[in-house]
Image: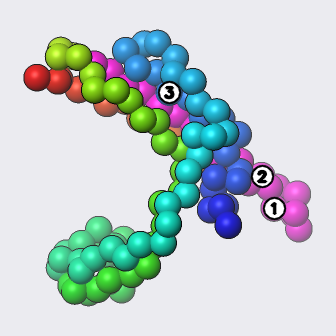
Amino acid sequence: MRADSVNHTVSVTCEIDAGPWRIWPASAFQSPLYTYGPLPDNNVLQYFGLDAPAGSTSLSVADGYFVMLAPLSAGHHTIHFAGVILFTQRRTDSTSSSELDITYHLTVQ
């Protein structure tokens, strides 16, 4: 079963060095079930107020859009990706969205 956010994705874009990179539905991938942890103390889940003491483990999956690249040539590169998720509440007929817009500036040696 797909993660709800992947099911409601309405836009996904990726650019590498200002050139568009093709994203298509087959770019969506869900990993097999895996276990993460044991977690250290002061982990990111604790930061967000979740009960995740040191030593905790949990089952998880990764689900989203992924791009696989050949190794980049030496030099400076920019990777920019963005996406929009749109949710509609059936009971209230209201919509909400979540947007992601990230740019990485990389130097390959």
- Residue 71, magenta (yes or no): no
Q: Which mark is residue 95?
A: 2
| Image location (x, y in percent) of residue 25 | 67, 39
Label 1 element class: strand
79 horizontally vs 30: left or right: left
Q: In this view, does 18 lie above or below 31?
A: above
Residue 55 placement (x, y as % from top left): 22, 86
Mark 1 or 2 closer to N-term? 1
Q: Is residue 63 left or right of residue 43?
A: right
Pointer 3 and pointer 2: residues touching (CB < 8 Å)? Answer: no
Give the image location of residue 12, x and y in percent: 60, 34
How far apart are the alpha carbons under marks 1 and 3? 29 Å
Q: In which quarter of the image is the C terminus?
A: top left
Mark 2, Cα crowd under 10 Å, few <14 / some 14-19 / many 20+, is few
Contact (Cβ within 8 Å) of mark 1 with mark 2: yes
Residue neighbourhood size for the residue with mark 1, other residues' Cα within 10 Å, grouped as few (<14), some (14–19), many (≥20):
few
For the residues labelled 1 and 2, the Cα–Cα distance comes to: 6 Å
**Mark 1 or mark 3: whose residue is earlier in sequence:** 3
- The amino acid beneath tag 3 is Cys
Q: Determine whether 86 is above or below 35 in the image.
A: above
Upstream in sequence: badge 3 or badge 2:
3
Instruction: Write the residue at 17% across / 79% down.
Output: 41
Which residue type does callout 2 highlight? Thr
* Image height of 17 relative to 84, above or below: above
The residue beneath circle 3 is 14
Report the magenta residues as a range. 77-96
Q: Please say if the residues under marks 1 and 3 sit with CB atoms less than 8 Å apart.
A: no
Q: Quadrant of the N terminus?
A: bottom right
Q: Name the residue under label 1.
A: 89
Q: In which quarter of the image is residue 108?
A: top left
